[in-house]
Each structure stands twice: as structure tokens, then as C-alpha cells.
Image: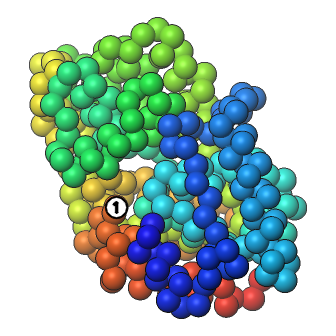
Amino acid sequence: MERLVEALEGVGYREGASLFGAPYDFRYAPAAPGVTARAFSDFSTSLTRLVERASERNGNRPVILVTHSFGGFYAMEFLNKRPLPWRRRHVKHLVMLCHGVGGSALIMQVLASTMGSPSPAPTLRDTVLSFGNRSFGSMFSLLPSPKVYGDTPLVITRAKNYSAENMPEFLAAVGFSDDEVARYRTRALPLTLNFRAPLVPMTSINGVGVPTVDKVVYWDANFTEMPRVVNGDGDGIVNLETVLALQRLVGDVPDQPYFKSILIPNTTHNSMISDDSALRVVVKEILEVNQATSS
């Protein structure tokens, strides 16, 4: 995020005065409904205090939340766990970069690779496997959601296809224990199925025009071998289908006050916050949001 911070400072934002950071531990997923999660609870408490303090330091004006990648998932869950009056009092806008809704087939390939198969291409490995290993709760939360993908085949073999609908069978097939599959059923799956619009104004900015994993083929069901990858559109990590799903699951919600989606051609997941051309788009949107009159 360093280049984005520099770009924002270049238009007048000042660290500690009008620009603040909210780090989170990517190993942990947000809490599922009715489940406690200490890491996410601590994050939520810290971010609540930061938002309120930032607002107070700036004339009690509501803040703009800007996220990138998995941070968007954290921000959406954070907002939906805050009371609606608090959200509308303290948050003017959510600007979410490089995040759709509903996970990715790429994560299924990553989890299969932990079974001993070759890793995805270096650029994907460096970005996605940096999230960690199969013990990290965040990995399960990034798996394809039935809410977005339904029964569309995502991992294809000669004898059986795996979709978001039969994810537990896939996890068992690539070597997860019964306890780990149960953790997916009770923690990750309810979280993805409970996705809701944040009910604060929101702008989604994503890259497109970059080959992005759409389906993975292990024809002989040998998950220790390199699969054949079928690419779709996206930013190399986030599939366009999950970006378009935001319109249905956020933009079309009657109580969602505002939703805007921006697609930047030929922009990768990482270049969104490092390339000058993408940063100009992002900063322009943030400035427009900042200057807009709150309803």
C-alpha cells in the first residue's frame, strides 16, 4: 500500500491527521454468525476506536474506508457487525479495491497444491500462497461460495466435478481431515452465505483484462500433478464473475444507499496499488467521495 499512501499524501492527506492505517492478521478469518473469533473481535474493537478518533480529529466528519484485496472482506464484515446508526454516523464511504464476493477457484488449486502437487504459476504463488497454508482460517473463507457460483463445476476430473455446492467433498479429496472439513462447514461456509451489503455508500474498483483462474482440470483426479487451468477474465487473482456479483448482492439491495463499480483494463491485482495509471483512478475516486456532500 506504500504507493497508494504516497499518492494520497501527494493530494493533501497527512498520516496521523487525515490518513490512518488499520492492520489486520490475514491468517484469521472474520467470525461466522453466532461464533466468537478473538482475532477478529480485537480487530473490530481497534478499528471502531480508530474510526471514531479519526472522525473526532476531523470535525466529527464521517470517514472514508479504503481497502485492498482481503482487506475488503474484513471491512465488509466489520461494517455489518456494527449497528447501522453507527455505520451511517461514522462511515461516509467504502472504497474497495481488488475484491469481489464469493471467493475463487484459484484457492481450490492452492489447497490442492498443499497436497504435494506443483504450485500455481510464480506470480500467483507469490500473491496467494503468501496468505499461508491450509491451517489458516482465511484460506477457507476465500473458497468459492454457493451464493455466487452455485453448482458450476470449478474443479473438473474424469469421474467427478467439484463445485461450491459440494466443497466438503473436494476438501476431503485433497486430504483435509474430518475435523478440518467440519471447520469449513461450521465457520467458513456460514460466513460466506451470510454476505450482506454494507448499507453505507460503496465504490468497487477492480482490474480486468488479465487471465484469471476460472476452472482447474485434474483429469485423472491426481491432485499431486500440475492441473490444466482454464482462465477467465479478472485481475489475475480476483475473477470478474465475483466482481459482477457485487452489483447483484450490493448494488441491487434496496437499502444500499449508493453503489458504483469501476473496471480498469489491463490492471493486475498488485498493480492496482502500484502503477501510476491505476493510482490516478483510485485517488480521483477518493477525492470525489471526500468532496461529495453527505446525504
Direction from residue 226 to residue 72 in the image, left or right = right
Q: Is residue 43 above or below residue 20?
A: above
Callout 1 secondary element: loop
Q: In which quarter of the image is residue 20?
A: bottom right
Q: In this view, does 48 lie above or below 58?
A: above
At a point 58% along the width and 54% down the height, the residue shown is 23
Query: Residue 118 appears at what percent x and percent y?
Result: 15, 31
Q: Which residue in the rendered view is the most extreme toward the front? A: 16
Tally the numbered discs.
1
Query: Residue 174 appears at what percent x and percent y?
Result: 30, 18
Direction from residue 171 to residue 84 in the image, left or right = right
Direction from residue 236 to residue 230 in the image, left or right = left
Whether residue 245 can be seen here: no
Reading the image, the residue beneath label 1 is 269
Whether residue 241 can be seen here: yes
At a point 84% along the width and 83% down the height, the residue shown is 59
Q: In which quarter of the image is residue 168?
A: top left
